[in-house]
Amino acid sequence: MATTIHPQPPQPSFLKATFAVTGKDLSAEFRSRELFSAMLVFSLLVILIFNFALELDIATRQSVTAGVLWVTFAFAGTLGLNRSMAVEKDRGCLDGLLLAPVDRAAIYFGKVISNLVFMLIVEAIVLPVYSFLYNVNLFNAGLLLVILLGSIGYLAVGTLLASMAVQARTRDVLLPILLFPVAVPVLIAAVKASEGFLAGSDFSSIYSPLSLLIGYDVIFIAVAYMVFDYVVEE
Amino acid sequence: MFPLDAPPDTSAYMIAGYGVFFIIAAIYLVSLFVRWRNIDRDMTALESIEKESKSIPPKKASPARRKGAGRKNAARKR
Amino acid sequence: MQPKPLALKILDIGSLLVLAVATYLALVYAPEEAVMGQVQRVFYFHIGTAWTGLLGFLFAAGLGIVYLVKKDLKWDIAEVAAVEISAVFFFITIILGSIWARPIWNTWWTWDPRLTTAAITELIYVAYFMLRQGIEDPDRRARFGAVYTLIGGVSAPITFLAIRLFRTIHPVVIGSGDPNAQGTFAMTPHMLVAFFFGLFAFTIIFIDLFWNRIRMGQLAAKVEQLKLNLMH
């Protein structure tokens, strides 16, 4: 009935809505920079702590670099995910977003992309710092590809779980507990593939972790796309 | 026949295994029972509260009783 | 709450009986294994709980999907029941496996694909209960629970693949030889009887506990509803 009186405005296209959500997040973050600086300082501190915890001398460095990097990214990623969703929830932006006449999956993808941008920026700073501090050359096209794929998989699940966690009473502690056990495969595959590229092993040994990484990304993006509606439904 | 052929004596581990199994099973059953009892207790408590809250409105309104009383009074007056 | 149905009472008694028979078959009827000795008997209950636990998790993911489609809380109650019982069974599996591994592999624990996947799967379902605990609204709790069981059900097999790939390239040698290969044995017919009866017994026990737990869930849902009614 109401639609006949007030004809609905035409729905913006899916891509346009997705990038609108991303753009909103990026411009808000560009002004405050609180999320980004927290993630960055946190990751640098984690690397520092690993230095003392693992006695990163030259021999151990070779074998643990991939592991240290991924643990750092995972922790920083959790921090960012928690914060980016909590901000939406506290300021009531999430309700506003949900009222907008767009496909809700567009909101999900918009959040994934903005989280991905933050994480990639942090990684882009952490990598040179790590290579500088430990004298390891990390500039390797394969490694960068693995970092991109791993971050996508981690954030695809993470964004979905973070939007559940912020609606719970124990939200700050809940996200890592929900996320880590289901993100284990992506972390394993990413560490394995990074190790392979860093050691310069031939492609046949890197092929299987890399394909697992791509498989994980595809499967979890598809699952999250299907269930995101149920997570934000009122 | 030869001591080498005899299987190693691992019965302590077997006993431990089955002991742990039955202990965990018992703990789970007890937890089910305790939770069930607590829910049951809540249920009876809530039901009695609901009954009380339902018995209040008729007291407040109780038009039937008042009417009846009024009729009685009227009868007396007559 | 209506009184316990007769069928459930019969099932209760029946599951106690099959548990007793399964214990007898595992401890007395099956012959002693020649290489591992008595501890091999733990295997019958280990496999029984492992199978029912794993199937229970898959079943719970299925119930979660049904809930998301139908939006009827009775499916959620069934899902919680399935996850809870499977989590208990799976915990028993891990403990029994660890007790078996101590004399056979000479260690309580090894980061073998199966063990690691089992531990991570158990953690996923512990997280499931923590998620549910933090949410007050029954419908939202049910939706999130269903989504998380679905994600857990998808992730656990991928974890298994991932760890297998990791370990075949970096084999961890504990004791002597590949831990996966140690402790295999051929089953005699009597062992097979104990083995299959164990599977059957734990399936019956699972169904019995599942039914009882659903009844408890229904009662709990009623109590919650009454509380909400009284508050408003």
Image (cartoon, rainbow, N blue to C red):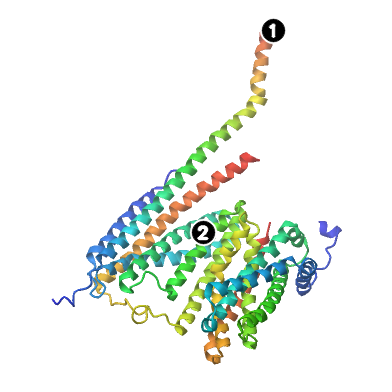
Residue C64 in view = yes
Percent across and percent down for residue C112 are: 42, 75
Secondary structure found at label 2 = helix
Rendered-image quadrant of the C terminus of chain A? bottom right
Q: Say which of A71 and B5 sits in front.
A: A71
Rendered-image quadrant of the N terminus of chain A? bottom right
Which residue is found at the position 83% from the left and 63% from the top? A8
- Tell whether C83 sits left or right of A82: left
Which residue is found at the position 66% from the left and 77% from the top? A126
Q: Pointer 1: what residue?
A: B77
Mark 2, Cα crowd under 10 Å, few <14 / some 14-19 / many 20+, is: many
Percent across and percent down for residue C111 are: 43, 74
Secondary structure found at label 1 = helix
Q: Pointer 2: what residue?
A: C79
- Tell whether A44 sits left or right of B30: right
Q: Is residue C85 above or below residue B66?
A: below
Query: Which labelled disc corresponds to residue A18?
Result: none
**Host chain of mark 2:** C
When asked about the image quadrant of residue A5, the answer is bottom right
> Disc 1 or disc 2, which is closer to the eye?
2
Q: CA distance from mark 1 to mark 2?
A: 68 Å
The amino acid type, in three-letter code, at marker 1 is Lys
Which residue is found at the position 19% from the left and 74% from the top? B6
The amino acid type, in three-letter code, at marker 2 is Glu
Q: Is residue C119 above or below residue C228?
A: below
Q: Say which of A143 and C20 sits in front.
A: A143
Residue C70 in view = no
Mark 1, Cα crowd under 10 Å, few <14 / some 14-19 / many 20+, is: few
Q: Say which of C71 and A52 sits in front.
A: A52
Percent across and percent down for residue B54 are: 60, 32
